[in-house]
Amino acid sequence: MSAPRLSADRARCIGAGMCAMTAPDVFDQDPDEGLVLLLHAEPPAAHRTAARMAVGVCPSGAIALHEPQPGDLA
């Protein structure tokens, strides 16, 4: 089974920085615009819990976690 994948919609991001504070090994903020930067689309297992939490605390809903479905190819 494949790993969960993250996506980030910079057009929807409001630059609150909650993702970067919650999961700094997975997200950062653009130094010029303050918008989300996705460092790892497939976060390592050690960072997946923090990544899930970051998705939940994003005030604009700009980040999403896509869980693999049974039968998905790796």
Image: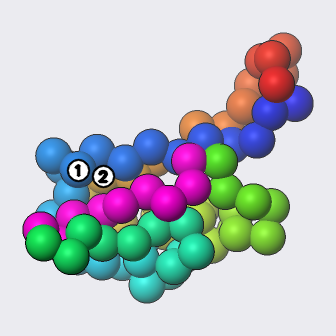
Task: Tell me where residue 74 appears, x and y as whole percent.
Answer: 82, 25
Q: Please name whichever residue, 70 or 31, is drawn nearer the observer in this view of the structure.
A: 31
Where does the image place residue 38, in percent across and percent down from the top left? 43, 57
Distance from disc 2 to disc 1, alpha carbons, whole Å, reads 7 Å
Q: Is residue 53 above or below residue 43?
A: below
Residue at the (21%, 57%) spot, across then down: 13
Which residue is labeled 1 in the image?
A: 10
Q: Could you say which quadrant of the image residue 36 lies in?
A: bottom left
Between 63 and 43, the one lying in front of the other is 43
Name the residue type under label 2: Ala
- Residue closest to the eye, 6 or 70: 6
- Magenta highlight range: 33-41
Disc 1 crowd rating (10 Å Cα; few below 14, some 14-19, many 20+) is: some
| Place of residue 65 in the rendered image (x, y in percent of width and height, measured from the top left) | 55, 46
Mark sitting on residue 44: none
The residue positioned 55% from the left and 66% from the top of the image is: 26
Please say whether residue 9 is visible from this viewpoint: yes
For label 2, the residue is 62
| Above/below status of 59 relative to 64 | below
Residue 11 left/right relative to 28 = left
Going by the picture, which residue comes out furthest to the front?
32
Choose top left, top right, bottom left or bottom right for residue 67: top right
Task: Tell me, yes or no, whether the highlighted magenta stretch contains residue 1.
Answer: no
Q: Are marks 2 and 1 in contact (CB under 8 Å)?
A: yes
Q: Which marked residue is nearer to the observer: mark 2 or mark 1?
A: 1
Left or right of residue 29: residue 1: right
Residue displayed at 56% across by 47% down = 41
**The magenta stretch spans residue 40:** yes
Looking at the picture, does residue 22 appear above or below residue 66? below
Task: Considering the whole magenta stretch, tell me its main secondary structure.
Answer: loop
Give SS at disc 1.
Answer: loop
Along the polypeptide, which appears first: circle 2 or circle 1?
1
